Amino acid sequence: MAVLTDIDGTLSPIVPTPDMSEVSEELRDLLRRLSERYLLVAGISGRKTEDAFDLIGLEEVVYFGNHGFEILREGEVEVIPEALPYLEKIQELERLAKGELAPEGALIEEKGITASIHYRNAPREVGERSVEFVKREGERLGLRITVGRGVVEARPPIKADKGTAVRTLVEEYHPERAMFIGDDTTDLDAFRELEKLREEGALREVLRVGVASDEGPPEIETEADIVVDGVDGVGEVLRALLGED
Ligand SMILES: [Mg+2]
């Protein structure tokens, strides 16, 4: 069986800023022991892959991060094969942005297979120029460009989310059963992909564990097989997997 889990809001309580997040020593110990007993324990997160690793801090766990584009195991980051041809394009865009936008005050964040150009702290016209430049050059390079709050991002034009991450892990590790624990909208992709994998016969059994919270979407409870209350409830599930009360 594969134990697949979201991190923020599932293994660590939601806190005012992401850098305050923490996984408790107790949960870390449960995850360590689970990884000895089960085929696979993986943390699947929207965060940068290295941040996901820093939060859980266990080499035994596999990490899927960076919008579903990267896997980290035994200290090595691998980009999913479908996205790999775009690595050079991302680097090319970063190089261009460093030459063109960084001198004006934009911040180029090199995230490996994705890139973020931040302009929140730069003058407004720098923001406008950044968006225009990244859209033009990114599209020329065949990348997908999205504009957020104070940031323009480039990524490979490939579908990658927690659902594709779950599929990749199932196809690679071949568990008979898989579970996913999550609390938020992006986790629903994982729930739905598990169900698809079961219908296809790739998995014999699946278990979707919804973590109830005030801010989470209602589907986390309606689409789950079981619902637990917050991070403490997740701890109970992990202990049950180890046969402990
Ligand atoms: Mg979460």
Image: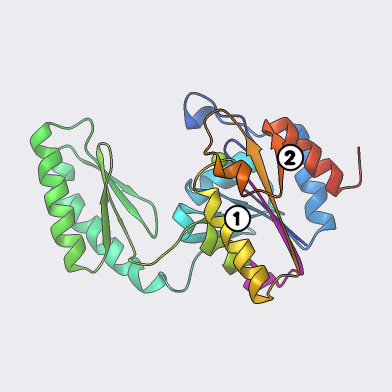
Q: Is residue 156 toward the left or the right of residue 99 in the image? A: right
Residue that badge 1 annotates: 191
Q: Residue at x 60, y 55 (%)?
A: 191
| Magenta segment includes 241 | no
Q: Callout 1: helix, strand or loop?
A: helix
User: Would residue 104 be seen by someone viewing this image from the given angle?
Assistant: no
Quarter, ligand 1 = top right
For the residue marked with disc 1, what is the amino acid?
Phe
* The residue carrying mark 2 has its beta carbon less than 8 Å from ligand 1: no
The residue lying toward the viewer, choosing from 161 and 188, is 188
Residue that badge 2 annotates: 28
Instruction: Farthest residue to the front: give it.
Output: 222
C-alpha span from label 1 to label 2? 23 Å
For residue 218, which quarter of the picture?
top right
Magenta residues, start to end: 170-182
Above or below 98: residue 205: below
Count neighbours of disc 2 (C-alpha within 10 A) and say few if under 14, some if 14 to 19, many if 20 or more: some
For residue 55, which quarter of the picture?
top right
Give whichever of discs 1 and 2 has the lower sequence position: 2
Instruction: Report the number of discs.
Output: 2
In what quadrant of the picture does the N terminus appear? Answer: bottom right
User: x and y percent of residue 135 in the render?
Assistant: 17, 56
Contact (CB < 8 A) between labels 1 and 2? no
The residue lying toward the viewer, choosing from 135 and 184, is 184
Count neighbours of disc 1 (C-alpha within 10 A) and say few if under 14, some if 14 to 19, many if 20 or more: many
Of labels 1 and 2, the one closer to you: 1
Above or below 77: residue 213: above
| Magenta segment includes 178 | yes
Q: Residue at x 20, y 40 (%)?
A: 106
User: x and y percent of residue 97 in the render?
Assistant: 19, 52
For the residue marked with disc 2, what is the amino acid?
Arg
Instruction: Farthest residue to the top: give it.
Output: 16
